[in-house]
Image: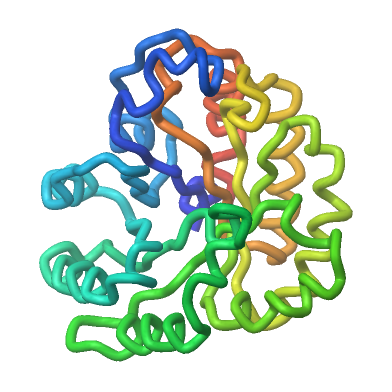
Amino acid sequence: MILRDKFWLWGHPEGRYNKNAGEYGCPDVSRMTPMEACLYLGIRNTFMVPVGVKVNRRQYNKSFKTLNKVGWECFVACQKPERIDEIIEEAKEFPNISCVVLDDFKVLNHGIPRYKEFPLSTLEDINRKLHNNSVRRLDSWMVLYTYQFGVNEEEDKEFQPYMDEFDGVIMWTWKESDVPLIPEKFRIFKKQTPNTRRMVGCYLYNFGEAKQATGDAVKWQLDYYRDLLLKGEIEGVVLHTNTMADLDYEAYDVACKWMDEHGDETIG
């Protein structure tokens, strides 16, 4: 296996963040699809995250045919469990569908963390379906931001059973200004996931501060995460996202150059 096999795209419908200067600071127009971004960035897996856009899932799954692994975002399954059955059914035809991911799992919704909207038994039921079905085992992942843990010990303790229920957790840093906190946050993250698989996310656009990411911050993260991969402390890195990848932004050029240099390194 080579390093690029451990990288995923956090994919959105093409154009989802076009001309969003008032929200995320991007005035430009992109046309790059998730599959095109995987090819452009030189990576082999994707999470597909519709972010409120109604998409033709079959068309996207067909476009992902040559990827190693595909995962679909499915937080809605916490309210509509039948959505898991739909993904399992899709997995019959598309053998690279390997998992689901629950985005913004701990983000506040009207002042209350989203995970408190349903009992822990809901997650147990979702995993039971994913792990034991007539097609194959599918894994469950969740998104966790660095600002959401390591701040309040009691809150972390209360949330721990939810983390433990997932097969894996993806650690993200929302604001680029928090990148220097990553080593300490990862130390805490490791303690919270002793028996849980880990991935980390890297923003190629600084959504948290509504501006372009810097090449220096992206390169630092990729170098740091490469070291974690080689040590076996994480199993993957997720790059966010396709929707600015063709806009000549520095961070994307740095990511492409980095993958050209390191992507074919052998990894255990």
Q: Nearer the viewer, residue 37 or 145?
A: 145
> How many marks on residues?
0
Q: Position of residue 66 (x, y in %)?
A: 24, 48
Residue 31 visible: yes
Q: Nearer the viewer, residue 168 or 222?
A: 168
Q: Is residue 133 above or below residue 229?
A: below
Is 160 on the left-hand or right-hand side of 262?
A: right
Is 114 on the left-hand or right-hand side of 30?
A: right
Rendered image quadrant of residue 135: bottom left
Q: Nearer the viewer, residue 231 or 97?
A: 97
Q: Quadrant of the C terminus?
A: bottom right
Residue 69 visible: no
Q: Is residue 35 above or below residue 149?
A: above
Q: Position of residue 17 (x, y in %)?
A: 40, 24
Is 168 on the left-hand or right-hand side of 76?
A: right
Rendered image quadrant of residue 75: bottom left
Q: Position of residue 239 (x, y in %)?
A: 53, 40
Instruction: Please name the residue shown 67% across and 57% down the image.
Output: 229
Q: How is the image coloured?
A: rainbow
Instruction: Please name the residue shown 75% across and 50% down the image.
Output: 147
Instruction: Please name the residue shown 34% across and 49% down the image.
Output: 48
- Outermost residue toward the front? 110
Q: Is residue 195 above or below residue 204?
A: below
Q: Position of residue 223 (x, y in %)?
A: 73, 39
Instruction: Please name the residue shown 57% across and 50% down the image.
Output: 237
